[in-house]
Amino acid sequence: MQTVLLAAGDGERLEPLSASVPKPLLPVGGDPLLVHVARRAVAAGATDLVVVVPPYYQPFAKALGDAVDGVPVTYAFQPRPMGTANALVVARNHLDGDFVVLPGDALYDDAALGSLYANVPTVGVRARDEPATDPVVVGDGGPLDVERLADDESGAYVDAGAASLPAEAKHWTRPPTNDSGERDLAAVVERTAAGHDLRPVVVDDHVDVDSPADLLAANRRAFDEWAERSPGQTVDGSVDEMARLHGPVRVEPGASVAYGAVVEGPAIVAAGARIEADAYVRPYSYVGPKVVVGHGTELSSCILLSGATVGSMSTLVDSVVGPNADVGARTHVVRPTQLPDALDAEADVGPRPTPNPDFGVVVGESATLGDDVHVDPGVVVPRYATVDTGTRLRAADTR
């Protein structure tokens, strides 16, 4: 079945990362998120992929090419984000039958995807959050009533962003705009429900990448799946005889792992990266191209993008470091109770805290952190920011 992948959104909630790398192209488990989405779609039954992309499409074409696992890829250009229904406007000329629509930034479980492809029309739904902010789906597993009223208390599920739709739905691309002035796919689903026996597919076991914590969760899921497929080790780079690799580890060409270093899989050391002596790379870590991990530094469940540097004797956990960022020596992401009183200085670079931190730190592109910086979990350091040596970066005191 033809499949539309929505990849033209701006990813504001993942800034500053998405300001440097489009959200669908951020790496999870060693590959761009969109590549994982496309492969899952093909495995579920996609016969053609129509990828809706922004005008600067070249990075997307580089990631996907002209085919994914033998299934052809066509690119449709959305000049500016105007909603998911509007994306169908640019995709519809490539559609000639029933089709599936999937967000390019969400990983659904195989069973749910299989149901979407096997039954038309269907809509992916997830358990409703309180208070509801998405269109409410009212129903008990039978034909669905879909309502726009977010304060309707009768719905147990809400739209999860994926649907299989009848061929005529490609023409229903001018529904009323939402509060943001955009036209949502949910409105197309509503119209489908009005004239078809629309059925729900529960997709609670999915990761919708909308925050740094979501990105790390997707990274863990992708790594788990990769480890299951490739439980051994692939070493195309240089690993010192006194270094140790444990579990599923990939060391790509031009990468090096120095004396005394440990890499514990699932983990990937990408092309040209350098793990210096006595560093410890723990599971679920992606060390991107030309990244440097300093002497004695410890990483766990981290994503380090191209060209980043983490200085010696540092500790990063559940963190994402943007392209070409420079994290100084002895930088630590720690809980406030672990900090000595002497490190109680506030940063003046304007880091953006999160109310309920569930990740370590996000460091934006080309930001520079001096030595001996201590970071509360949940801090986001903007692109190009400079953090002085000895600074403590605080998260919000609302936890």
Image (tube, rainbow, N blue to C red):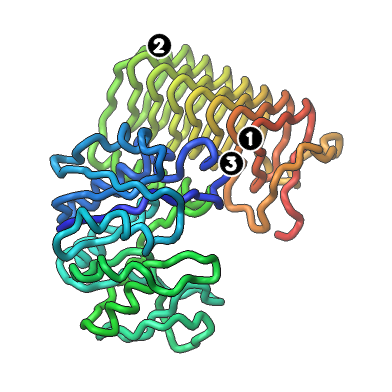
Give the quadrant of the N terminus: bottom left
Q: Would residue 211 be seen by someone viewing this image from the given angle? A: yes
Q: CA distance from mark 2 to mark 1?
A: 35 Å
The tag on residue 16 is: 3
Determine contact: label 1, label 3, CB under 8 Å.
yes
Instruction: Please give the name of the residue rendered at 23% of the width and 52% of the height, measured from the top-left corner.
Output: 41
Mark 1 Cα-neighbour bin, 10 Å: few <14, some 14–19, many ≥20? many
Instruction: Please give the name of the residue rendered at 72% of the width and 35% of the height, measured from the top-left corner.
Output: 374
For the residue labelled by badge 2, is the local secondary structure a helix, a strand or a loop? loop
Name which quarter of the figure residue 233 lies in: top left
For the residue labelled by badge 3, is the local secondary structure a helix, a strand or a loop? loop
Out of 281 and 290, give the one closest to the viewer. 290
Instruction: Please give the name of the residue rendered at 75% of the width and 45% of the height, measured from the top-left corner.
Output: 394
Give the labeled residue for mark 2: 240
Mark 3 Cα-neighbour bin, 10 Å: few <14, some 14–19, many ≥20? some
Give the labeled residue for mark 1: 383
On the image, the x and y values in percent for residue 58 come to: 36, 33
On the image, the x and y values in percent for residue 104 come to: 36, 51
Q: In this image, 235 relative to 378: left or right?
A: left
> Given the image, on which type of amino acid does mark 2 rest?
Asp
